[in-house]
Each structure stands twice: as structure tokens, then as C-alpha cells.
Image (cartoon, rainbow, N blue to C red):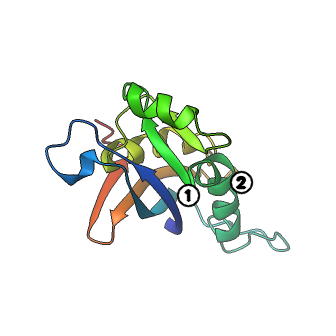
């Protein structure tokens, strides 16, 4: 069985080597979809009876391990030193420095890598993360799949 939970967050970024407008500082209303696989729990009296995982728990774990860190932050590439130095000079600015350029593809891969262990077999029902879909805009997204992270 597959289940998916969608969350949204706002963040800024820039793609330093981009040939067009994305090389400038800008932001997006991102959406992230987390797809898990597992067996449906069949335990009378269990709060998760009939579920793969409670959707509210999927949300709580995603927020604690990723979304709250990225929400209303500037996602900066460590190699973009001009921007990293500039943002570090702003008192209290919420900056997340990443080891990769913050494209939709890389953000989806980073999210998958961070969340993979978080959802692993939580209930003994073979639960695992299968896919992270990251929407940069309503019409543009990237999928990081368990079988294809390259």
C-alpha cells in the first residue's frame, strides 16, 4: 500500500550558474509530497489500526526533520560564497547552507536522504519512504525515488 502526505513551505534560493532569471535571489511556495509504502496495520485497539501510518504523524515527522528548517529560510549553496557571506552578515537571518545547488532536483534528493531513516519501519509493518516529490511551482517538480536517486 502507498500513502502520500503533502506539506507546503516558503523559501528563497538562487541558482548561481543559471543563464536566466533564476540566478537572482527569489523565492517559491514549495510543496513537498512524501510517499510511504507499508502494510496496512490490522490490530484492534491500536490507534493506527487500518492505516499504513497516521497522516498526522507523517506530517509531524516531516516538519520536525525538514520542513520547519527550510520554511521561511534562504536555501543557499555553500559554493555560492558571495551569498553565504552576505546572508551571514544579516543578524538572525534564517539561512540553510547546502552542499548542492538548491535546484528542485537537488532539494528533492536532499529531502529524501534526510527523511529516509525517519520513516523506516516505524510500526513493524515494513514502512519505508518510496518517493519525495518537490514542487518548485505548481507546474514544475522533481521526484526523488527510492530506485532512482541519480
User: Where is residue 50 drawn, in percent x and y?
Assistant: 67, 75
In the depicted structure, whether residue 97 falls above or below residue 137: above
User: Where is residue 139 drawn, in percent x and y?
Assistant: 26, 70
Position of 132 compared to 105: left or right?
right
- Which of the two residues, 58 or 48, is positioned nearer the viewer here? 58
Position of 117 compared to 144: left or right?
right
Occupied quadrant, residue 92: top right
In the depicted structure, whether residue 136 falls above or below residue 76: below
User: Badge 1 is on which residue?
Assistant: 38
Q: Residues within 10 Å of mark 1 (few under 14, many from 20)?
A: many
Callout 1: helix, strand or loop?
A: loop
User: Badge 2 is on which residue?
Assistant: 123
Q: Quadrant of the C terminus?
A: top left
Q: Residue at x 44, y 38 (%)?
A: 76
- Which of the two residues, 149 or 108, is positioned nearer the viewer here? 108
In the depicted structure, whether residue 25 falls above or below residue 53: above
In the depicted structure, whether residue 88 falls above or below residue 39: above
User: Where is residue 102 drawn, in percent x and y?
Assistant: 37, 42
Callout 2: helix, strand or loop?
A: loop
Q: Residue at x 58, y 61 (%)?
A: 39
Residue 1 visible within the image: no
Q: Residues within 10 Å of mark 2 (few under 14, many from 20)?
A: some
- Which of the two residues, 38 or 14, is positioned nearer the viewer here? 14
- Which of the two residues, 68 or 77, is positioned nearer the viewer here? 77
- Asked whether the beta carbons under mark 1 and mark 2 sit within 8 Å of each other, the answer is yes
Q: Determine the residue located farthest toward the left in the rendered image.
A: 19
The earlier-in-sequence mark between 1 and 2 is 1
Amino acid at each position: 500500500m502507498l500513502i502520500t502526505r503533502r506539506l507546503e513551505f516558503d523559501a528563497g534560493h538562487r541558482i548561481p550558474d543559471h543563464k536566466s532569471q533564476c540566478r537572482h535571489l527569489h523565492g517559491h511556495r514549495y510543496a513537498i509530497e512524501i510517499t510511504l509504502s507499508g502494510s496496512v496495520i490490522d490490530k484492534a485497539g491500536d490507534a493506527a489500526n487500518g492505516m499504513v501510518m497516521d497522516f498526522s504523524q507523517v506530517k509531524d515527522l516531516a516538519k520536525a526533520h525538514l520542513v520547519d528548517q527550510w520554511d521561511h529560510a534562504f536555501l543557499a549553496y555553500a559554493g555560492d560564497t558571495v551569498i553565504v557571506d552576505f546572508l551571514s552578515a544579516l543578524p538572525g537571518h534564517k539561512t540553510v547552507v547546502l552542499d548542492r545547488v538548491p535546484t528542485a532536483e537537488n532539494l528533492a534528493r536532499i529531502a529524501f536522504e534526510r527523511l529516509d531513516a525517519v520513516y523506516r519501519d516505524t510500526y513493524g509493518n515494513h514502512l519505508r519512504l518510496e518517493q519525495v516529490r518537490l514542487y518548485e511551482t505548481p507546474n514544475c517538480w522533481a521526484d526523488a525515488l527510492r530506485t532512482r536517486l541519480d
